[in-house]
Image (tube, rainbow, N blue to C red):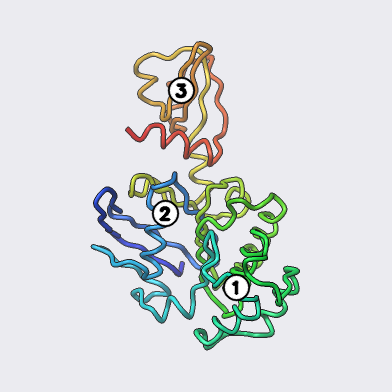
C-alpha cells in the first residue's frame, strides 16, 4: 500500500513540551483522524510536516520524498482553524494572491467551487461567516490539484450542517484514490463517520495509530457496582462514585470483569477521555 505521508521518529523539543519519537503513516486514498487533547502535540506535528518549524530528530516523507518546500507548496492543501488571508482582501483578491504560487492553479475550478459553496467573490474575507471562511480555505486547497489535504481543527465552531457538508467534500476528495486527508479535530463524531484510520497522540507520544475499526473493536466500556483491586488495574480512565464505576479495558479482559458488569462498545470520545484520565 503506497504511503502518501510517513512520519518516522519525529522529535521536537521545547522548554516545557516535546514530541517524542512520533511515528505514523497515511496510505493513499484514505482519511486519517489525528486526535488528542489540547496541548498533546497535534499542531506541532502538523507544523513539522508543513516545514513550518525546525525538527530535532526523525524524518518526514511526503509522496515518497523527504519534506521540502516544493512538495509542501505544490501537492499539499492546508485548511487551518482560521484563515491566513488578509482580512480586507476580497475572495477574488485571495485568488490573485495565491494562484501565482501554484503552477497547477485552476481558475475555472476555483470559480466553480465558490459558486458551489455560495460564496460571493466580491465579499471581503472579514465579512464571511466562520463556515464560509473554512469553505474558502478548502476551495483554495482544492483549486491547485492537491493530493494531500491537511486540516487542523477547521470544524470547531461550525454548525452540524456545515460540518456535514465538509465531511461530504472530504469523501468526494478521496474518491480519487491518489488523494488522502489528515484531519485534526476535537469533534470525533465527524471522524466516526468518515475516517478510515485514527492516530491518537497524548503528551507528545503516539498512543495508537491504525485502522479506526480495529481501535473501536479492541476496547470496551465497562460499568458496574463494585471492583476488586486486580480489576481496577485493568481499567483505563476509571471513574468511581457512590453508585458504581465506569472505565474502558482491552477486549481480552472482559472475562476478568465482574459478572454483573455492563459491557458496551466504546466511542472515540470515550477512548480519548479515558486515555487522558489514565495518563498518570
- Residue that label 3 marks: 239
Q: Percent from the top left, x then y, of residue 220?
A: 51, 32
Residue 226: x and y, percent?
46, 12
- Frontmost of labels 3 and 1 is 1
The answer to the question of whether label 2 and label 3 lie on touching residues, with beta carbons closer than 8 A, is no
231 w.r.t. 89: above or below: above
Classify 203 as above or below 154: above
Task: Give the residue displayed 42% in from the left and 21% down from the top.
Answer: 256
Q: Nearer the viewer, residue 244 or 97?
A: 97
Q: Decide which of tag 2 and tag 3 comes sooner along the chain.
A: 2
* Residue closest to the far front: 88
Q: Quadrant of residue 52?
A: bottom left
Question: Which of the 4 image quarters holds residue 51?
Answer: bottom left
Q: Secondary structure at mark 2?
A: helix
Give how far across and how far down residue 265 sits, in percent: 57, 33
Tell me which residue sits at (53%, 39%) in the image.
269
Q: Residue at x 32, y 62 (%)?
A: 8
Q: Are circles 2 and 1 on residues that touch, CB within 8 Å?
A: no
Q: Which residue is mark 1?
A: 88
What distance separates the C-alpha of mark 2 from that of mark 1?
Answer: 30 Å
Amino acid at each position: 500500500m503506497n504511503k502518501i505521508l510517513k512520519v518516522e521518529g519525529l522529535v521536537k523539543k521545547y522548554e516545557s513540551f516535546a514530541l517524542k519519537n512520533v511515528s505514523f503513516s497515511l496510505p493513499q486514498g484514505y482519511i486519517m483522524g489525528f486526535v488528542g487533547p489540547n496541548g498533546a502535540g497535534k499542531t506541532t506535528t502538523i507544523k513539522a510536516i508543513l516545514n513550518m518549524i525546525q525538527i530535532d530528530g526523525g524524518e518526514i516523507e511526503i509522496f515518497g520524498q523527504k519534506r521540502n518546500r516544493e512538495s509542501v507548496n505544490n501537492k499539499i492543501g492546508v485548511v487551518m482553524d482560521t484563515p491566513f488571508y488578509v482580512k480586507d482582501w476580497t475572495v477574488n483578491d485571495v485568488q490573485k494572491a495565491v494562484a501565482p504560487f501554484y503552477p497547477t492553479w485552476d481558475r475555472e475550478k476555483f470559480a466553480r467551487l465558490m459558486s458551489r459553496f455560495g460564496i460571493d467573490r466580491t465579499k471581503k474575507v472579514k465579512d464571511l461567516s466562520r463556515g464560509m471562511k473554512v469553505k474558502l480555505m478548502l476551495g483554495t486547497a482544492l483549486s491547485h490539484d492537491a493530493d494531500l489535504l491537511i486540516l487542523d481543527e477547521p470544524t470547531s465552531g461550525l454548525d452540524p450542517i456545515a460540518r456535514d457538508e465538509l465531511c461530504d467534500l472530504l469523501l468526494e476528495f478521496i474518491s480519487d484514490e491518489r488523494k488522502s486527508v489528515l484531519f485534526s479535530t476535537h469533534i470525533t463524531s465527524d471522524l466516526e463517520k468518515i475516517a478510515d484510520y485514527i492516530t491518537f497522540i497524548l503528551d507528545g507520544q503516539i498512543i495508537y495509530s491504525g485502522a479506526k475499526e480495529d481501535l473501536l473493536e479492541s476496547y470496551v466500556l465497562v460499568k458496574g457496582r463494585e471492583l476488586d483491586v486486580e480489576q481496577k488495574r485493568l481499567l483505563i480512565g476509571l471513574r468511581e462514585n457512590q453508585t458504581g464505576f465506569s472505565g474502558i479495558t482491552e477486549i481480552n479482559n472482559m472475562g476478568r470483569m465482574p459478572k454483573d458488569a455492563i459491557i458496551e462498545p466504546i466511542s472515540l470520545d470515550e477512548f480519548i477521555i479515558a486515555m487522558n484520565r489514565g495518563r498518570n
